[in-house]
Image: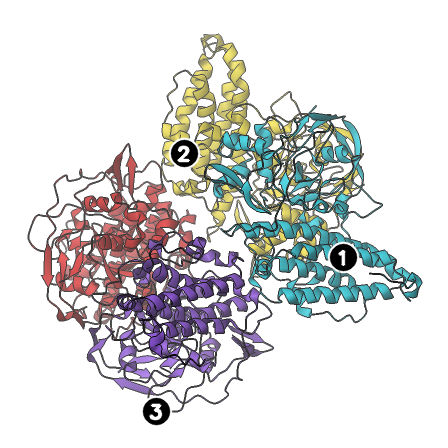
Chain colours: A purple, B cyan, C yellow, D red
Amino acid sequence: MPDSKPPQARRGAVCPADLAARYRAVRAQTEWLCEPLAIEDHVLQCVPDASPTRWHLAHTTWFFERFLLQENINGYVPVDEQFYFLFNSYYQALGPMHARASRGQLSRPTVVEILAYRAEVDARLVRFLDEADADTCRRIAPLLELGCNHEQQHQELMLTDLKVNLSHNPLLPAYRALAPAETATPPVQTWVAFEGGIHTIGTDGPGFFYDNEGPRHDVLLQPYALASRLVTNGEFLEFVSEGGYRRPEFWLDLGMARVRAEDWTQPLYWFERDGQWMDYTLGGARPLALAAPISHLSYFEADAYARWAGLRLPTEAEWEVAARGLPQTGNLLDARRFAPQVAAAKPGLQQMFGDVWEWTSSAYAAYPRYRPAPGAVGEYNGKFMCNQYVLRGGSLATLGEHIRATYRNFFPPEARWQFSGLRLAKDA
Amino acid sequence: MPDSKPPQARRGAVCPADLAARYRAVRAQTEWLCEPLAIEDHVLQCVPDASPTRWHLAHTTWFFERFLLQENINGYVPVDEQFYFLFNSYYQALGPMHARASRGQLSRPTVVEILAYRAEVDARLVRFLDEADADTCRRIAPLLELGCNHEQQHQELMLTDLKVNLSHNPLLPAYRALAPAETATPPVQTWVAFEGGIHTIGTDGPGFFYDNEGPRHDVLLQPYALASRLVTNGEFLEFVSEGGYRRPEFWLDLGMARVRAEDWTQPLYWFERDGQWMDYTLGGARPLALAAPISHLSYFEADAYARWAGLRLPTEAEWEVAARGLPQTGNLLDARRFAPQVAAAKPGLQQMFGDVWEWTSSAYAAYPRYRPAPGAVGEYNGKFMCNQYVLRGGSLATLGEHIRATYRNFFPPEARWQFSGLRLAKDA
Amino acid sequence: MPDSKPPQARRGAVCPADLAARYRAVRAQTEWLCEPLAIEDHVLQCVPDASPTRWHLAHTTWFFERFLLQENINGYVPVDEQFYFLFNSYYQALGPMHARASRGQLSRPTVVEILAYRAEVDARLVRFLDEADADTCRRIAPLLELGCNHEQQHQELMLTDLKVNLSHNPLLPAYRALAPAETATPPVQTWVAFEGGIHTIGTDGPGFFYDNEGPRHDVLLQPYALASRLVTNGEFLEFVSEGGYRRPEFWLDLGMARVRAEDWTQPLYWFERDGQWMDYTLGGARPLALAAPISHLSYFEADAYARWAGLRLPTEAEWEVAARGLPQTGNLLDARRFAPQVAAAKPGLQQMFGDVWEWTSSAYAAYPRYRPAPGAVGEYNGKFMCNQYVLRGGSLATLGEHIRATYRNFFPPEARWQFSGLRLAKDA
Amino acid sequence: MPDSKPPQARRGAVCPADLAARYRAVRAQTEWLCEPLAIEDHVLQCVPDASPTRWHLAHTTWFFERFLLQENINGYVPVDEQFYFLFNSYYQALGPMHARASRGQLSRPTVVEILAYRAEVDARLVRFLDEADADTCRRIAPLLELGCNHEQQHQELMLTDLKVNLSHNPLLPAYRALAPAETATPPVQTWVAFEGGIHTIGTDGPGFFYDNEGPRHDVLLQPYALASRLVTNGEFLEFVSEGGYRRPEFWLDLGMARVRAEDWTQPLYWFERDGQWMDYTLGGARPLALAAPISHLSYFEADAYARWAGLRLPTEAEWEVAARGLPQTGNLLDARRFAPQVAAAKPGLQQMFGDVWEWTSSAYAAYPRYRPAPGAVGEYNGKFMCNQYVLRGGSLATLGEHIRATYRNFFPPEARWQFSGLRLAKDA
């Protein structure tokens, strides 16, 4: 859009213009993800963990309205006060909220009304930025950035939640058409060794980071090696074929119990049709892509596979030390592939970023001297540090600008609906 | 639509034209009921019993396609073979079916696609009627009529299911705007007495009837009396106010257990706001209409109320003997009131048809020498004759042409989401 | 114990001596049933329905203490006030009670302590009878008789509950050694026909009866016939072998759902070992006795079998009219056989009393003009008249003096742990 | 027992006599714990986690029979082959087992029969030791020691399981009479500081240790301090009184969810009676001992308390480094106090061993280069390393010879039925 006025002509606009630009770009990306959807698709919640798309659209908006507008504008009047109840996710300090498992029980506000809610908050927020003084800008910039990162996280969840919700339909609908699966043979898996000793992990900035990534601190490692690439569907199929899901010697006790209780016999989206292994993907059902990385593993399955292979998962510190110097590139959401891709036949660690999140053996816990942020926003991370395991590296559904070596994702060990796989590790 | 061609011009049209006309009218009524809905509303299933509107639209269509077209056209090719699985409700003889409780887990086919499915089956069916010979017409006419009655039953369910599904939304959306509640005082309840002895109930025709309404047979009654009108909200409120939901002496054991397990403290849609009793209606939340009949009672609640009042529910035979000679008029769906109305101040039995279904004390069971219809359609009624109670008289959501004195509706004793209330009875 | 004093020497003993004698005999019978048990056996409650033996011993005692001693002795001090809470079963009018499903969570009072409780209440009750005046005797005699009948009911439950509790032990322990199963061929099943018309059923006395057996009233029957004997294990095995448990066409909808949810593939205690059908009996596991009556059927299974056989269950009125003139003899608890026996090869109806309770197609409901007894004892029967079906005729675990033609037993349609089977019926 | 024969007279006795002596002592201790119990008490299992006493008696015996006798005696014939199924706990490599949650569904073998089983295995084992050659002795000694330690662990579980099982009885029975609670004021809590840097934790022996205690390895700590004593009931009562259980800001998300789902309002065994706080102890109900350490906390409660206090739990490495040089004395099972005791008013760390297990913030995980033992016995620890937290220091129910500074106990964060409390920590 051509604009001949010089920047200084925007009177009162003391916030850097790229704040609003960044905000707009993040918001637009969210809406772009919904383009292929039918209205009906926005409503589904087939499992408690997988929120409806309409909820994601509204909740990310609520985050900006509630944390930024409400807290920084005197006498602020909400777009709709009931949305404060409906679209709060889990911030207890902000009052009661609609039950998570009931998000799929709502048809109103409709998608159109939610998009109008988004537009209204966008307008108010941009106006607010436009009118803010320099102090205010400095003060709210970190929160705005947190809100943008928050929305990017939900972009990934929109895809994983949508996938699991659509998968309950016997018609197995496609989210969008994908490129055909690659048929290349994956490169041989080799080992990349690392030295033991004291290493430093975590971050205190500069640049955006979540509170759980800090403080930066020393850790003591023993010598170790990481596999050069992710485990593939074909490799995991061997585990399945050798009765892996029926042999307790490979499983954690809770894992085996889950396998039996839910009758797991293969990864979440695999199924057999006419003697062929099929995979439900964002492009619908298609033959299992043997050369591509395995996805949608729980921690239990990743751990059992590693044990079957006589190896182990990396710790999160081992992973981070290895990733620290690498370029943050890979099959990320920016590539718009929407499916894991076969590793490149290159020396060194491949696929560290993108494709699938990599389970580590590290229970999700606070780093030494960790302090959650004060106020309601302090509920973002800390209160979830129990019975979850850390995943690293991002996936095909993660934006490149959102991921980094210190980034800690986390899910319960039974979670299978994320784009999650594994890289093997061993003692050196 | 003016049509100057004489009827005989429709060559081959040997089926009476009113068969197709009736079919079209029933189908149009279904779609009319959906007019006020947002697309999102069609998807909800908040409790296993309450199917999504989109499912009702499709299932009623499936009934005609599967029972009529498929069985009567050689080499018939279904509109979509997968719909035979998706939209079969419970006819085991026709093969496997999608699980009832999972109907809300589907967003596809979309509403638009389902409406196209309806249109396609409509076209095929009318063409089939158009081309059928006289024998075929005679043979399929009862099944067509069954399909029409089946769809009318689902019209009522569409409203009851929609109401319970929308009620899970804290916004309490309205289905459509209603006329304001009447504020008149209800007429005094009086008693209408009936003689004992041998009476005949049930029907063998002529005219359409469900198999569970026959055979016509004799029953032996003792003298009894029925209340002149339905129990009102105001009367039921006394029961609530006197601690009725906490006093086991009025309740069946299973009823008290249900009250406690689900924490019932008043009828399903009642709630208190600022010290006032409110009622969630098809027009949204509004102050409780004290003079209007109580609705949405379970059998447990109706039975407990009657016991509290020192009276009892009628048996279905008592109800039918009393209703047999009365005009089948009342506050039915045809009136488009969508809410129970205050009884008229007239002598004799009022409100026998319409307003709310009336619970009877009769367990739903086969009449003597009852035989289900042969084939899959025999699953329509007979297999449900267990742990359900009979309701009589239709409701505000029942079409006038669909109800009659011999009509037997039935629900489990804990069911509250129907338009169901009660009329008191006593021994005479 | 010889006692040379003349009866008149018992000063004040105005209650008929046989009241106390009857009481003592009933109590002794209960304790005799426990003789083969280990202390540990008294504690088990493996399913909510099957109370521990120690609870039955205490609850039957509580019934006499609470309803008779407490209500008739001024200033009565309970043996242990806490027992009023612990051993009340379901009499809400008497205050709160220990949860039914938690009865197996108690080890105290111990069996020895409960036997001491029994002895103490026995002593108090006999003393009370000894000292009561004539008016009191007349007044309390019906309640004493109710208490005796109540205890006899629990004698049967002690056996059925014990059996299901022991059956959860992989060792399949025997309650006591049984005579070997008969190997005779059962007599051919024939039909005994009855006329339609008005019959009278139910009772108003004289003699003890439960309130649910009255009032005596007329019923209108159509001509019918009953099978001459009970269905045998061998006959039921045919149903199993022909895939009966997998064929929905024979089942009520709720029945099929239960079959699938609980994976029923044969009657409760049947299992296969080395290719042979075995049956867990009160004598432990033994080969299935093909000629003996089938036992431990739910209503669902009895009904499905009848439908498979092209026949039906009798109504309770049909059964009672047929049973009314017959001698109340059979394989009852008095015979101490503890297993169903092969029918005699005699003309007329066999096995109407004893062996197994016979499911009828009648939902358990109040007879016309039924009134429960006033007070807490009115909770004995009436409040259970919902979602249960009537069984008739008693079983191998019923005392002969406890059963009669008008006796109405009742259980939910899914109940399998009673000694329950079926006799076929048909329209004539 | 006087024995005049010189030791060398025991021909063939090449195993050190103290092996058998130790075995006998451990076994006798188990049986001593049962002395106060009624037979009925041995049967209870009121929650799936709390196994019946009779099961513990049998399972510990099975461990010796199955791992030691069966594996080391050619042609060994089990005492009862069915016990291999009944009394295996979780060793999948040894075949199927009776379901854990169903252990309370068994009354046979009876307690007397189980004691006979114990005696028979004892006799066989002592005979085996008596006859074993030196090589065999050396080989089996570690396994025998493991079995003894295993039985000691079950001794503690017998007490914790019994306590929770008896607590379901409204009579609140006492296990045995306890000394009256101390009323002394607890000493002021002070801080003991420790330096950061590289420390070594874990053990590779000598002396018995569980595989999860090794390998010995270096850890990197930051400076920290531990509280001088355990948190008391009185201190925890402040948290309760200030609404601690209702304030989400102190709780992990899973913790708050558990609090709400199970309606926790205070520690497990606390209750109010007549306005006074009571505590259910092994000596029955008694007024809460304010000066004594709080017990029966879940990790969730311990963590919430620490957060409320503005402090934190120690890591397991911090605890071990602090405990390493301390004498392993305290209020342990040897003291036969059966209740936590008030801390001594002495300088330095008090109560590090005994009283209650101390929750640490460390998720239970493998130490670097951990390898489970080969074979079935390798299932002892490793497979439970998921969703559990480490506790340190032993409790009033732990034998002094069983505990040590490197000992790692572990339970899920919601577990409350152990003798578990907390010691505060902070960064220094």
Which mark identifies residue A230? none
Q: Real-space Cα distance between discs 1 and 2? A: 54 Å
Left or right: where D182 falls relative to C32: left
Q: According to the image, label 3 marks what residue?
A: A347
Which mark identifies residue B375? 1
Q: Nearer the viewer, mark 1 or mark 3?
A: 3
- Observer able to see residue D74: no
* Residue contact between numbered discs 3 and 2, judged by CB atoms under 8 Å: no
Location of residue C408 (image quadrant): top right
Q: Chain of mark 2?
A: C
Q: Real-space Cα distance between discs 3 and 2? A: 74 Å
Q: Are labels 3 and 2 on one chain?
A: no
Which mark identifies residue C86? 2
* Residue contact between numbered discs 1 and 2, judged by CB atoms under 8 Å: no
Q: Nearer the viewer, residue C420 or C11?
A: C420
* Kind of residue at badge 3: Pro
Tag 2 secondary structure? helix
Q: Real-space Cα distance between discs 1 and 3? A: 68 Å
- Observer able to see residue C12: yes
**In x, y percent, where is residue B215?**
80, 42
Q: Nearer the viewer, residue A337 or B63?
A: A337
Tag 1 secondary structure? loop
* Kind of residue at badge 2: Leu
Q: Nearer the viewer, mark 1 or mark 2?
A: 1
